Amino acid sequence: MNTLEISLRPATVPDLDLLFAIQAKRASLHMAAFTSKESENRDAYIAKWTRLLPTPSVSVQCILFASTLVGCIARFEVNNEVHLTYVVDQQHWRKGIASEAVHQFLKLELRRPVFARTAHDNLGSQRVLEKNAFQRVGQNTAFANARQMDILEYIYRLDQKH
């Protein structure tokens, strides 16, 4: 993958319709698993992210592939811990886009440690995190809204600058 084809830029309110369409696809919801109860409600999504985009504890970057918006990557805080999440449009899975986007994002986000979580069966996201030096540090069973059941999730941590 030519890294020049992948770039990040701050997300804006006009991006939210397309970002909603990407994350609301059934395959994306299934792989993410731990989604909000309203993950398929466009109005709730737009309202939530319109409110969160200017928040200092949240950083959302659009992922561009050959200048086309194909997903987003975000940092948020929980109990003063930095957490990472991302989504790439299903038609662009397995192209190295998520790995490169995480790599670029970690150059922007300098706080450490950074945590990420993934469903136990989301092997693609596990590979993305491991390629970017995240280490699996634990696991937890929790209710996954997108699957309507308890599932195992893996907890990852990145300590050093990458």
Image (cartoon, grey):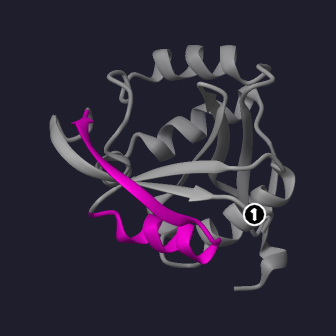
Vertical order, 86 against 55 (above or below): below
Residue drawn at x 73%, y 24% is 53
User: Residue 75's image quarter?
Assistant: top right
How many numbered marks appear? Answer: 1
Few, some or many residues within 10 Å of mark 1 (<14, 14–19, 20+)? few
- Image quadrant containing the N terminus: bottom right
- Image quadrant containing the C terminus: bottom right
| Residue 122 falls within the magenta-colored stretch | yes
User: Residue 47's image quarter?
Assistant: top right
Q: Is residue 7 left or right of residue 87?
A: right
Residue drawn at x 75%, y 63% is 160
Vertical order, 57 against 102 (above or below): above
Location of mark 1 (residue)? 160
Q: Position of residue 81 (x, y in %)?
A: 63, 35
Choose between 16 and 121: the one closer to the eye. Answer: 121
Q: Position of residue 40 (x, y in %)?
A: 36, 29
Choose between 45 and 37: the one closer to the eye. Answer: 37
| Residue 124 falls within the magenta-colored stretch | yes
Choose between 142 and 138: the one closer to the eye. Answer: 138
Q: Is residue 87 left or right of residue 3?
A: left
Q: Position of residue 11 (x, y in %)?
A: 76, 37
Q: Amino acid at mark 1?
A: Gln
Choose between 94 and 126: the one closer to the eye. Answer: 126
Q: Which residues are magenta?
A: 121-144
Residue drawn at x 58%, y 40% is 19
Residue lying farthest left? Answer: 149
Q: Secondary structure at mark 1?
A: loop
Q: Position of residue 64 (x, y in %)?
A: 73, 59
Residue drawn at x 52%, y 35% is 20
